[in-house]
Amino acid sequence: MNLSRRYDFVLLFDVKDGNPNGDPDAGNLPRLDAETGHGLVTDVALKRKVRNFVGLVHGEQPPHEIYVKEKAILNKTHERAYEAIGAGDALKGDDKKRKGGGETVEKARDWMCRNFFDVRTFGAVMSTGVNCGQVRGPVQMTFARSVEPVVALEHSITRMAVATEAEAEKQGGDNRTMGRKHTVPYGLYRSHGFISSFLAKQTGFSGDDLELFFKALEQMFEHDRSAARGQMSTRGLYVFEHESELGNAPAHALFDRLTVAPTAPGTPARDFGAYAVLFDGQPLAPGQSLPAATGVTLTRRC
């Protein structure tokens, strides 16, 4: 893909009988807009799935290592960068003081961008402890919001076992553990994304990286199954490609023309077939492209 152009995109995905993104401050209930009842999925959650997919496909090997991953110690990764650029001496001294500065930080930042996919894609703040600078990523995404309000259900579940002998004695050998599970019966979510060619040049984000990112959006739910999340699927990835780096039309104007509406208003939706996705009133088949504006092409990738 050509990174001398601007890209904007719309991602549609759905959940059926699952929790797409639990809120730890609300007992892991599905995230909701308290005023409207619309479901929410954070950009952080979506980026996590992209990171997991890329790590799975490329085996966590440079140039596709993942910086923000489970159990990572970020300053240890920063130290790797300093060792790699021959600045290991800068790591010596008081551990409480931030290390590195000037040209060393720039070299460490460039090394991080070259080796870590998520750093050159989403950006990162790497200035704590061992200083590798800050990166503003060329790919940015919004929260995903459900097309219609969703209902968060709570289910009681039973496990036919207990964790300790004391619990078994207390229950007289009945050995049952009660728990709760939160789900959304069905929700179709929409997220918007933006890709800057100017920032891509600064981080080294390439056309191959962009293709991998779009592939991750298309397939990330296929490799992220869990009982808690139910059935989640990518239902559409609509990409607006501009002929110029600055763009040929405002992103919001393009997004507004891509409508997602229920086919039977007032009836609770329980699958993707309950919605019509139209651009200027016309459906797009997967793989279809059409002119969206002067100098802008819309392609439905999936």
Image (cartoon, grey):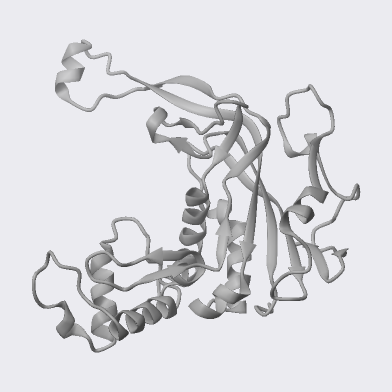
Q: Is residue 35 above or below residue 249?
A: above
Residue occupying the point 72% across, 58% down: 251
Say which quadrant the C terminus sits in. bottom right
Residue 5 occupies which quadrant of the picture?
Answer: bottom right
Give residue 220's position: percent from left, percent from top.
56, 56
Q: Is residue 3 above or below residue 190?
A: below
The extreme front residue here reads 102
Q: Mark yes or no: residue 78 visible.
A: yes
Give the side of residue 153 with respect to residue 253, left or right.
left
- In percent of the image, x 59 and y 70: which residue is there? 212
x and y percentages locating residue 98 in the rendered image: 20, 69
Judged from this view, the residue extending furthest toward the bottom is 86
Residue 301 visible at all: no
Which picture quadrant has residue 184? top right
Question: What residue is shown at x 37% (from left), y 61% (from top)?
Answer: 68
In depth, the one of 64 and 126 nearer the eye is: 126
Quarter that holds the N terminus: bottom right
Against 214, is 150 above or below?
Answer: above
Percent across and percent down for residue 122 are 49, 64
- At horizontal 46% and vertical 36% (from top left) the residue drawn is 22
Residue 83: image location, x then y, percent: 23, 83
Task: Report whether 192 appears left or right of 177.
Answer: right
In the rendered structure, the answer to whether residue 85 lies left or right of residue 150 reads left
